[in-house]
Image (cartoon, rainbow, N blue to C red):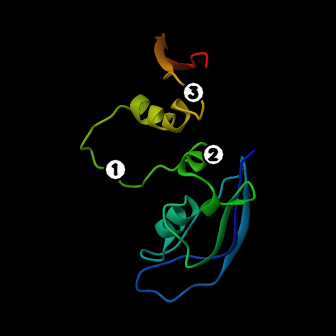
Amino acid sequence: MTRLETDNLVIRVPQRAPGVPLSFKLEAGQVWGVLGPNGAGKTTLLHTLAGLLTPRSGRVLLDGVCLEKLKRGQIARRLGMVFQERHDDFPATVMETALIGRHPFLFLPGSVKAPRITVWRRPPCSVWMRLIWPSV
């Protein structure tokens, strides 16, 4: 089970003084909300928790390991993020958008062949997806 935690995290909010250090543990299955006025740093906090921005101070830990010590692929296989704004330069269906989340799992270290993705529909409205891994 994945655990995300912060240890005295202070985020970098442009044109703002450093805030109060934040320490918390978020266990798998928990649901949290981030509330605050416009410009308070909510999106900056989420980007920092995802490892997209570096903190001003403190640490973000994923399963007890500092994000700075993990490779992007290792982070992406355990932590996902959907951005609040989407630019439709390449329009996608809901299924195509969901499949983007599978990208970090397609080429695991040691895999030689690319997996085959099979998508099929079962009436009336269920959509199933199966990811078939070739033998390595």
Query: For numbered disc 3, what is the local secondary structure?
Result: loop
Q: Nearer the viewer, mark 2 or mark 1?
A: 2
The residue singled out by tag 2 in the image is 78
Residue neighbourhood size for the residue with mark 1, other residues' Cα within 10 Å, grouped as few (<14), some (14–19), many (≥20): few
Residue 48 % position (x, y)? 54, 66
Q: Amino acid at mark 3?
A: Ser
The residue singled out by tag 3 in the image is 111
The residue singled out by tag 1 in the image is 86
Q: Earlier in the sequence, mark 3 or mark 1?
A: 1
Which residue shows up at 52% across the image and 73% down it? 36
Q: Amino acid at mark 2?
A: Arg
Residue neighbourhood size for the residue with mark 3, other residues' Cα within 10 Å, grouped as few (<14), some (14–19), many (≥20): few
Using the rendered image of the protein, determine whether residue 124 is visible from the camera's viewpoint: no
Q: Which mark is residue 63?
A: none
Q: Nearer the viewer, mark 3 or mark 1?
A: 3
Q: CA distance from mark 3 to mark 2?
A: 19 Å
Residue 19 % position (x, y)? 58, 84
Q: Is residue 49 above or below residue 29?
A: below
Which residue shows up at 50% across the image and 78% down it? 12
Q: Is residue 136 above or below residue 70?
A: above
